[in-house]
Image: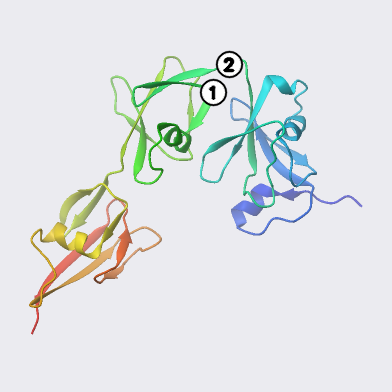
Amino acid sequence: MDVVAEDLCQAVRSGREVRRHGPYRVLIGDGALQFDPKVIADPVPTGTQILEAAGVTSPTDYVVYQILKSGLLEELRPDETTDLRESGVERFIVFRTDRSFRFLLNDRSFDWGAPHITGLTLKKLASVELTGNDVWLDVPGGVSRLIGDTEFVDLAAPGVERFYTRATVYKIFVNTRPKEVFTPKLTFWEVVKLAFPDASPSQTKIYTVTYKRGPSSNPEGSMVDGETVHLKDGMLFNVTPTDRS
């Protein structure tokens, strides 16, 4: 009796544990990001096995990248393995190695062996903190475009792409006043000082902080001294001072 292949894409989307034995159904794409389902029996395949599943007959002419859940593209060498049961990787891309694509990142020139690259991979190449920084694509004569961590950018388009990184700007409102913050989190007193710059711990005054329209980790609520909240564009804070009675 044939064993039905475990669909890794479906398992990852549903958040369920991957079956401990094969076969497994994965998606293998080409340079144009056209993905086809392929079945692999080995739960810990090598790069060579991925190439074989893709129908590649000349392995030395190709390279395999696995697409991590974060969006990072990670090369899988021919003799290197990946555990399909643990890594959360269900998609691979196979590229020819006889081409390279040049782009500029923070005014540095890079040659990349694939026609596409993700925002998170660009952050890694720029050696910046992965959280708290954004990647932008310079659009000559237009408005620069924000590149998401999992977004693929086509490097094969005419011209040389110019990317740059900069600190993430969170636009929030404190007591209805717009504020720009360059950190993904704020402490209780950092929020208070955005409303009242001269505020400090006092025996005569207390501050009440409430917020809403936050990210899923803290969508709404209140803060006390010692607490920290994660930020989201458009987040609303209300800070109220009260004299101690």
Give the quarter of the image for residue 81: top right
Kind of element beneath mark 1 = loop
Question: Residues at badges 2 and 1 in contact (C-beta under 8 Å)?
Answer: yes
Q: In this view, does 127 lie above or below 4?
A: above
Can you give x and y, in whole percent of width and height, for residue 187 in the image? Answer: 26, 61
Coloring basis for residues:
rainbow
- The residue carrying mark 2 is 99
Can you give x and y, in whole percent of width and height, for residue 118 in the image? Answer: 48, 34
- The residue carrying mark 1 is 115
219 to the left or right of 210: right
Given residues 236 and 98, the one toward you in this image is 98
Q: Sort mark 1 into few (<14), some (14-19) or many (20+) by Cα contacts within 10 Å.
A: many
Q: Is residue 119 above or below residue 169?
A: above
Residue type at the position of mark 2:
Arg
16 to the left or right of 178: right
Kind of element beneath mark 2 = loop
Residue type at the position of mark 1:
Pro
Identity of the residue drawn at 76% across and 34% down? 49
Identity of the residue drawn at 77% across and 41% down? 40
Can you give x and y, in whole percent of width and height, for residue 67 in the image? Answer: 58, 39
Can you give x and y, in whole percent of width and height, for residue 57 in the image? Answer: 78, 22
